[in-house]
Image (cartoon, rainbow, N blue to C red):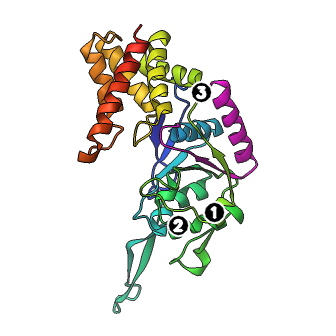
């Protein structure tokens, strides 16, 4: 559960007050990953969840952040990011005008203008001791993330473009950082620079075991365990077949299960609504081109066989 809250500085971005989701499922597998992550974070190291789409990286990162008990600054990596998008920059001017009439026959004017610095999310997190969750950080260009090197190692944030007295910010002792990323072969993903990866403890996430997927899907869809188990088995068998261009993930299980629950569909081959639901969600995992028509036909036959098998 996430709520927005204003930080102590009026010009600073709002932080998130994060609580554990009521439908978050902690199986032994997930609890082990959470405990390891908290141990690394409490020791002062950044944690990096790396894995394919649909493995729950962002949800897990926010859950771990909630266990730290500090407000969260949430950032999503972007190709257009620059360093100023992380730390902030000069935003306008602050003007001051003084009129001195101490001697009534003399009027003295004094004016000056000073550039005004406005923090962005990383600076606010470092200043206030918040938890930084940097989602899909490898979608940002590596040079934009260079500012994180000194933050994670020397606990010092360099603020370029400000006065020499204010050019450095000592990182708050309670500041922690959690990162997530997709594999490098995904579109729009940059290679993480070695210097940054070397400062993080990376935990590779794979697709969860069957029991974990069933319990998470059941909690997120309000569908009984037995019905969810059949849907998860269809998706897992389809995933194991390799007959797709995009891997079917647990999100497909949740989509199908939630619609089945809300529409009260019959999970049988003779219910065309259930069959079309499975084909719509899972059939889209193959690219739509003229050359792939035969592949889509074979995929449809296989999905129909899986639906029939798990409808018995």
Which sits earlier in the primary sequence, circle 2 or circle 3?
A: 2
122 or 260: nearer the viewer:
260
Q: Position of residue 71 (x, y in %)?
A: 56, 44
Dot 2: few (<14), some (14–19), or many (≥20) neighbours within 10 Å?
Answer: some
Q: Position of residue 290 (x, y in %)?
A: 23, 46
Position of residue 201 in the picture relative to residue 107 (left or right): right
- CB within 8 Å, label 1 to label 2: yes
Residue at (51%, 44%) from the top-left corner?
A: 52
Comparing labels 1 and 3, the label whose residue is closer to the camera: 3
- Element carrying mark 1: helix
Which mark is drawn over residue 142? Answer: 2
Would residue 43 be counted in the magenta stretch? yes
Residue 165 visible in rendering: yes
How far apart are labels 2 and 3 at the CA level?
34 Å
Dot 1: few (<14), some (14–19), or many (≥20) neighbours within 10 Å?
Answer: some
Q: Position of residue 26 (x, y in %)?
A: 61, 25
Position of residue 160 in the picture relative to residue 256 (left or right): right
Residue under label 1:
196
Residue 170 visible in rendering: no
Q: Position of residue 5 (x, y in %)?
A: 47, 43
Does residue 162 lie above or below 65 as drawn? below
How far apart are labels 1 and 2 at the CA level?
9 Å
- Element carrying mark 3: loop
Residue at (66%, 29%) from the top-left corner?
A: 29
Which sits earlier in the primary sequence, circle 1 or circle 3?
A: 1
Does residue 65 lie above or below 256 as drawn? below
22 or 237: nearer the viewer:
237
**Quarter placement of the C terminus:** top left
- CB within 8 Å, label 1 to label 3: no
Residue under label 3:
209
Residue range in magenta is 27-55
Does residue 298 lie above or below 154 as drawn? above
């Amino acid at each position: 559960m996430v709520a927005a809250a204003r930080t102590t500085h009026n010009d600073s971005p709002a932080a998130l007050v994060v609580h554990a989701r009521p439908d978050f499922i902690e199986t032994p597998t997930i609890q082990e990953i959470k405990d390891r992550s908290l141990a690394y974070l409490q020791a002062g190291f950044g944690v990096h969840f790396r894995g394919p789409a649909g493995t729950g990286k962002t949800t897990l990162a926010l859950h771990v952040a909630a266990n730290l008990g500090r407000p969260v600054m949430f950032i999503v990596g972007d190709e257009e990011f620059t360093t100023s998008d992380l730390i902030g920059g000069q935003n306008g001017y602050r003007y001051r005008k003084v009129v001195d009439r101490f001697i009534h026959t003399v009027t003295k004017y004094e004016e000056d203008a000073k550039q005004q610095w406005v923090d962005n999310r990383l600076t606010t997190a470092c200043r206030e001791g918040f938890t930084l969750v940097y989602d899909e950080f490898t979608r940002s260009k590596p040079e934009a993330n260079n500012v994180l090197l000194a933050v994670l190692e020397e606990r010092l944030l360099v603020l370029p473009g400000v006065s020499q007295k204010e050019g450095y910010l000592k990182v708050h002792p309670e500041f922690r950082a959690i990162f997530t990323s997709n594999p490098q072969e995904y579109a729009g993903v940059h290679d993480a620079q070695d210097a940054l990866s070397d400062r993080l403890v990376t935990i590779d996430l794979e697709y969860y075991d069957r029991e974990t997927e069933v319990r998470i899907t059941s909690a997120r869809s309000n569908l009984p365990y037995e019905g969810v188990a059949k849907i998860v088995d269809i998706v897992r068998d389809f995933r194991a077949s390799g007959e797709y261009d995009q891997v079917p993930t647990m999100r497909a299980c949740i989509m199908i299960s939630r619609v089945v629950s809300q529409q009260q569909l019959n999970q049988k081959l003779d219910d065309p609504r259930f069959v079309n639901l499975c084909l719509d969600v899972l059939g889209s995992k193959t690219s739509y081109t003229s050359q792939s028509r035969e592949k889509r036909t074979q995929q449809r036959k296989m999905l129909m066989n899986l639906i029939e098998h798990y409808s018995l």
